[in-house]
Image (tube, rainbow, N blue to C red):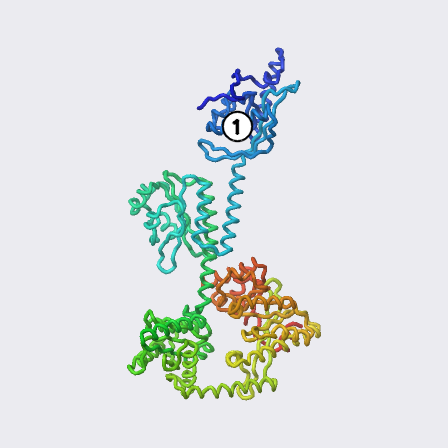
Amino acid sequence: MNRGTGGSPGAVRTPPVGPHSLLGIKKGPRDHRREADDEALLRALIDQVPDLLFVKDPESRFVLANDATARDVGEASPEALIGKTDLDFYEESVARKYLRQEHEIMFGALSFVDVEERSWDRSAGEKWHSATKLPLRNAAGEVIGLVGCCRDITHRKREERLHEGEAAILERIAGSADLADVLDTLLRLVEAECPGIKATILLLDEPGGRLHSCSAPSLPQAWIDAVEGAAVGEGVGSCGTAVARRQAVIVSDVETDPLWLDYRDFIRPFGLKACWSWPIINTEGTILGTTAMYCATSRDPSALERRLAAFATHISGIAIQRKQAEDRIRFLAQNDALTGLPNRARLEPIINHALRNAAQVGTEVAVVFIDIDSFKHVNDGLGHRAGDGVLQVIASRLLSILDAREAAARFSGDEFVVLLRDAGLESGVTSKRIAGLQAAVGAPIVIDGRTFHLTTSMGVAHYPRDGSTAEGLIANADAALFRAKEFGRDNVQLFTSEMKLGSEGRLFRQEEMRRGLREHEFLLHFQPQVSLKTGQVEGVEALVRWHHPTLGLLAPGDFVPLAEQTGLIVKLGDWVLRNACRQARAWQRAGLRPMTVGVNVSARQFRERDWIGQVAAALAESELEPRWLELELTESVIMQDPRTAVATMQALRDLGVQLAIDDFGTGYSNLSSLNTFPISRLKIDQSFVQGLPTARGDSAITGAVVSLGHQLGLSVIAEGVETTTQMDVLRSMGCDAVQGYLVGRPMPASSLEAILL
């Protein structure tokens, strides 16, 4: 040890003295016995104190110390400290700083109370103390030394750093920061607390069961390249085995452990001797990847390292799940949730891109509109689960016969649109490709042991003959499909200019709708919304129906699309708004408990110049307080022009009206903007609810939406709840309310009153 000199520079070193001598106490024979007794009592007392207690002479030599002080500096007993200074225990630069400091405390004016000090122990590494040092004076008031008390706060300082780091990381996760950057920050935080450790996180891909490096901030690129695509299984190193076993795998010596038999040559050049791996498992029991620690010495992890590994595994699981949920939501903004095919929003850009390429090279393009004949019988006879399975098989088959430059999209319900390249009319290519589509869909489909034989109706429009834009070609293919369906099942029609005359039929139906509005043929049904906390009906959604004089009661799907195409949706929507407000107020006047009534708002309505005035007029006319009206906007309506939409929404909130985002998760692609919208509720689309609890992706997204909504101070309601299992899962996720056939089908106002009374 470095036996330096304490005290002030140039001081004459004198022999150390004991406590009584230091205090100038004169002793007789009995005093010696009393001194021994007193010192024994003092020793017993101070050794029970967990803090460091010590007394030093004017040259900063230890005169008295307790067991805690001895342990802190690595000595076997307090007696071993007597006569020594900090130079005997610390690096010289640190010790010199302490000696100067203590000299200022004793002979200067330095106040030293509860000062946090950082030091570096030769064996234990970084240490922190909260220290108080005071000058020791005799009866004459002369400084005769220094008394000190230090509390080891190393653990507290580590916890503070971890809490601060965790908060910063969670904030970055909430802000949708890049996953690799988030995990790099997390592992650097862990490595800073575990000197000599190199940490990694590998992600497990779903399809192939392979591991891929996502973060390894302290390992070289050669290591990252070497582990890319690592297999999973028993005996495949620590990480591959941890995934296979679904539990931690601790390998203290890779040279001798059989799990590393085939991988020793790989790890040897990196100088790593031990590898400890923990699987990252989400709340549904799905393995997302692994957290691993590598060490240059052969050993087991310490308690601290195990704890920090658990910390890293937990936080990385949150980050990975959040990223997966966001990726899923972004995917669904442009793709169909059920089939994975592009949706209507993504279809037009795909077609327009193909048209530009076709124009450059002088080729033809065909757009095929496909409708599954009598698909309603599948849903009605065997349920929506079987129907969904059929649609998934059809989507897969369509993709299987298209090349990489072509595309298939789910347009709506049982309708698909297919883009065919190099589809010349004269060459007969289109006819052959259409026959291939018919054969693909028409082949037997087996779902749950039932075999289906389906046919299709198709309408075909060609570029450049039938249109030069995606919008025009889709419309003309739709017109051809309409003609094909008029001829019955299993029919194909190519678009002709005469089909434009078919719009006269649509004009007729448009006039029927106008007459229906005049003759009061439309009516409202109301679907209850039930709180998962109280079990009570807390609101209703108003849903329009058409009591057609010859066709009977029509659901919205039979006439709303036409209303949107023709612009009649504005008048129809205004009728729904006014009558929903009247009915809500009528219930209140009848003595029923006030509850929110939800009204869907179409894009055409929302863009109306006097839309705010229409809402205000409906409220004034019905005398309904604005807080009992909830307007439901779809994500696509908002994202068409976010800036204008937010201004309109804010004006509605200023009226006192509640706003909700309907079908959340099916069209929103900018999560970071969600907190700028003046909304009060999110409605989870039923496509996610239907997969609960078995569909992992749907469960992850639903849970993420509930969590996101609550973080933003929003209530969350799930649509399309049909089973008690779905409701139980939603309740466990913290969802606030549910809506669906399980708690109530859409019903007339009189039927709902009977429930509420």
- Give the quadrant of the C terminus: bottom right
Q: Position of residue 363 (x, y in %)?
A: 32, 76
Front residue (pair 511, 251): 511
Using the rendered view, name the quadrant where residue 407 is placed.
Answer: bottom left
Which residue is farthest front? 360
The residue sitting at 32% across, 44% down in the picture is 267
Q: Does 585 sit left or right of 213 as displayed? A: right
Which residue is farthest top? 29
Q: Does 243 sit left or right of 575 as displayed? A: left
Using the rendered view, name the quadrant where residue 532 is placed.
Answer: bottom right
Mark 1, Cα crowd under 10 Å, few <14 / some 14-19 / many 20+, is: some
Q: Is residue 366 at all visible to an observer of this figure?
A: yes
Using the rendered view, name the quadrant where residue 115 is placed.
Answer: top right
Residue type of the residue flagged with mark 1: Tyr
Front residue (pair 528, 543): 543
- Give the quadrant of the N terminus: top left
Above/below status of 87 relative to 472: above
Q: Position of residue 183 (x, y in %)?
A: 44, 50
The residue sitting at 36% across, 77% down in the picture is 441
Q: Is residue 491 at all visible to an observer of this figure?
A: no
Under tag 1, what secondary structure? helix
Q: Where does label 1 land, which residue? A: 98
Q: Position of residue 639 (x, y in %)?
A: 51, 67
Q: Position of residue 242 (x, y in %)?
A: 39, 50
How many labels were placed on the picture? 1
